[in-house]
């Protein structure tokens, strides 16, 4: 079972691959998946972290007008902009991060 993936299962099945793929997609459609927007990052010393208090500002490495990275299932998938809809934070997709089939992060 080391290389058991949906692709391998579908390709090894004697059933019609298109129909098999539809069945897998239909069954997986309601599966929850984590989506996470990353604002940015910065490296700080532990001594600085220990002194942080309410009101302190941490300046991140990314320019303020740059896109955020939206990870789907832990993998960078989209570029997006942050915003607000009815008093809730949101992101708007601005691009797709292209990946090769079989890429592993």
Image (cartoon, rainbow, N blue to C red):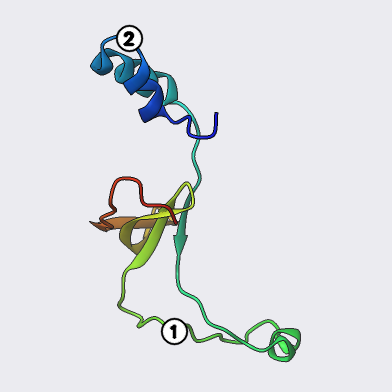
Query: Considering depth in this image, is 84 or 66 the residue closer to the camera?
Result: 66
Q: Which residue lies at the image location 63% right of the left edge and 84% below the top edge?
A: 55
Q: Looking at the image, which residue sits at the far top?
A: 15
Q: Is residue 96 left or right of residue 42?
A: left
Query: How far across and down, in percent of the image, does residue 101 sit?
Result: 30, 45
Query: How far across and down, in percent of the image, does residue 70 sit?
Result: 39, 57
Residue for badge 2: 14
SS at circle 1: loop
Q: What is the CA distance from the residue labelled 1 to the residue labelled 2?
A: 52 Å
Residue for badge 1: 61
Vertical side of 81 occupied by 92: above or below: above
SS at circle 2: loop
Q: Residues within 10 Å of mark 2 (few under 14, many from 20)?
A: few
Q: Is residue 41 left or right of residue 15?
A: right
Query: Considering depth in this image, is 51 or 44 the residue closer to the camera?
Result: 44
Q: Which residue lies at the image location 28% right of the left edge and 51% below the top edge?
A: 100
Q: Quadrant of the N terminus?
A: top right
């Amino acid at each position: 079972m080391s290389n058991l993936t949906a692709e391998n299962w579908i390709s090894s099945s004697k059933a019609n691959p298109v129909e098999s793929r539809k069945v897998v997609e239909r069954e997986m459609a309601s599966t929850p998946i984590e989506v996470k927007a990353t604002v940015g990052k910065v490296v700080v010393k532990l001594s600085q972290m220990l002194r942080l208090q309410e009101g302190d500002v941490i300046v991140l490495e990314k320019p303020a007008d740059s896109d955020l990275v939206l990870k789907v299932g832990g993998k960078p998938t989209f570029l997006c902009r942050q915003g607000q809809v009815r008093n809730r934070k949101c992101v708007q997709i601005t691009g797709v991060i292209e990946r090769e089939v079989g890429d592993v992060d």
